[in-house]
Image: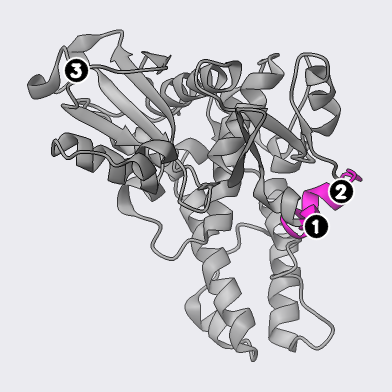
Amino acid sequence: MKDFWLSCGHHLLDRGEGGGLIVTDEFLKAYLARPELAPPPEACTVERTLHAALLNEPRRSITLSDIAAISDVDARENWQVMIAFRDLLLRHKTLESAYAELMRKGPNGTPMLFINQLTHVILRNALDGCEDPYVLRAAELFFRPQLLTVHDNALIAADEETIAGVNQQTVSPLVSMLGLPVEAQIDVMVDDNAQTYWERSDLFDMAIDLTAGRRGLAALAQVLTRWVSHLIGVDVEIEALTEVTDANFTWYVGLDAEGTKIGDKLWSDEELDEDALSDVIGLYRLTFRDPSIVADDVRGEPVYLILAMTPDRLLRMKPQNIVTGLPIRHLETVG
């Protein structure tokens, strides 16, 4: 079986009997390697002592008074955020259940960086055994913002940070720890080069065609299906649509903020102007294999999923929306 996304740290985690990821000391130590937490030479004794203690015992109880004793204001804030996040992970049996709580109750100060990293490693678990590079590349939309452009009548999505030339070592210290290359050259994924994804999956340097009716949006439907099944234990069918006529938007989920805005207008029977229509990247129809789990008032109706880009052609997907936004009676997180 081919491996991918080594930088997410999945090899540092254990897998429970229910298939969920179990936090290990090694995984927690990877966060301590982040530049925001590694004490600089001028760090005070309290900060250096705290960092060393946690490297030795990552689950060690840390109080607010322990952090308050750190002299540097920014360092105190970083440690408060990190310990709150660590404690969230440790309160739950699996990373999946921690993620579900975080999404249902709200981030409450959890940095988007941490949320994306959590999404990254959980999605790696959900896609374990996948051998389709198109599906894996489409999955990157869940945790990495994309920049869209039209080229030869095709809508191409490329990683925003890679295009901007951001050094990936600053995003994940595991990249440098594992000796992974960081220089990237953007290629659009096609059949001739798709198999090179396995050796470059941590570079995020392959673009994907998201033109309606083509392979990219269909691959994203497969990722969404696995995501729903893995996180909340619900079997669904998700179909990428190329056109819709007389659709009844009884229930919809915006897969990003722009998609939610468009869904709100459709639900209110508002006309969409040409700009709004041009911002829509993908439209999906979701149906439940077991209709009995669906709320009575929408049973028998499809759920529409809307993916859209901002006016400046950025796509910032919010995969948590499909976890929290489906009209189902009971939510079961992977254990």
Determine the residue positioned at 62% across, 41% down: 149
Alpha carbon separation for disc pair 3 and 2: 48 Å
Q: Amino acid at mark 2?
A: Val
Above or below — where is 262 with respect to 306? below
> Which residues make up the magenta segment?
165-181
Which image quarter holds the N terminus? top right
Specify whether 265 is left or right of 48: left
Residue under label 3: 246
Q: Are marks 1 and 2 in contact (CB under 8 Å)?
A: yes
Name which quarter of the figure residue 53 lies in: bottom right
Q: Are marks 1 and 3 in contact (CB under 8 Å)?
A: no
Which image quarter holds the C terminus? top left
Q: Please say whether residue 171 is one of the residues in the magenta stretch.
A: yes
Specify whether 167 is left or right of 62: right
Sequence order check: which comes first, mark 1 or mark 3?
A: 1
Residue under label 2: 182
Q: Which mark is residue 77?
A: none
Residue 325, image x and y in percent? 28, 36
Specify whether 41 is left or right of 291: right
Q: Of tags 1 and 3, which is closer to the observer?
A: 3
Residue under label 1: 167
Q: Amino acid at mark 1?
A: Asn
